[in-house]
Amino acid sequence: MIDDIDEKQEPVERWISFYLGEERYAVEVKKVREILRIHNIVPVPGAADYVLGITNIRGSVVTVIDGRSRMHLTQKKQDKLSRVVIIEYYNEFIGIVVDSVADVIDLPASAIDINPKINSHEGEKYIRGVVSSQSGLIIILDIERFLGCEQNTALAMGF
């Protein structure tokens, strides 16, 4: 459990945690460019069903995907807690809409169970591992797999 680990024994990495439904997920801080409120997402005809569209962030066109759709979760209307987590991915920026952002956590690599026994759904292929904490499980996303085809989608759309 992460709460029981002495962080002085091994290096730790920082993670941003967020919610999609009842589940708490995390992605490495070093891959997150910024976290924004949702605004002006323009749909793109013919895009994959999990691509909400594109938006302009300080002059850069950013593809925005729906985290719930990507993880094959039921849809929920966006609300005041919903955010777009902007990820830097192969010199491109891609936004992921999440239900809410939780906090920043420090994790040593040994805290991540990389062989979780998850009898889950289609989104399981995007899971790198899980971490147990006093507040419950935190699912560590494999962001490269999660965004794998978005790079090609963004490039194919000319962004």
Image: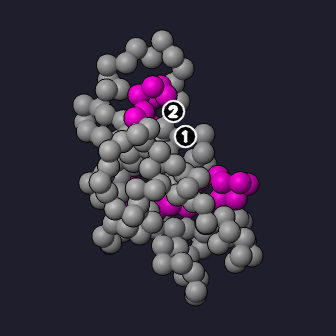
Element class at badge 1: helix
Q: Is residue 106 above or below residue 25?
A: above
Foreground pick, 117 / 51: 117
Q: State the image coordinates of residue 142 (x, y, percent, origin top left).
A: 51, 49
Give, as a single range, the part of the protein colored magenta. Answer: 86-113
Q: State the image coordinates of residue 150 (x, y, percent, origin top left).
A: 61, 66
N-term-proximal mark, 2 vs 1: 2
Q: Amino acid at mark 1?
A: Val
Q: Count numbered badges in the picture.
A: 2
Q: Which residue is mark 1?
A: 29
Residue 111 part of the magenta-drawn span: yes
Q: Which residue is mark 2?
A: 14
Whether tag 2 and tag 1 are in contact, CB under 8 A, the answer is yes
In this image, 147 relative to 140: left or right?
right
Quarter of the C terminus within the rendering: bottom right
Name the image quarter holding residue 86: bottom right
Residue 128 part of the magenta-drawn span: no
Q: Is residue 7 above or below residue 95?
A: above
In this image, 71 relative to 91: left or right?
left
Quarter of the N terminus within the rendering: top left
Residue farthest to the bottom? 45
Q: Is residue 148 above or below residue 77?
A: above
Name the image quarter holding residue 30: top right
Q: Amino acid at mark 2?
A: Arg
Foreground pick, 61 / 96: 96
Residue 144 shows up from this direction: yes
Image point 53% across, 41% down: which residue? 28
Residue 57 shows up from this direction: no
Q: Is residue 114 above or below residue 120?
A: above
Image point 41% across, 69% down: which residue? 69
Q: State the image coordinates of residue 41 (x, y, percent, origin top left).
A: 53, 74
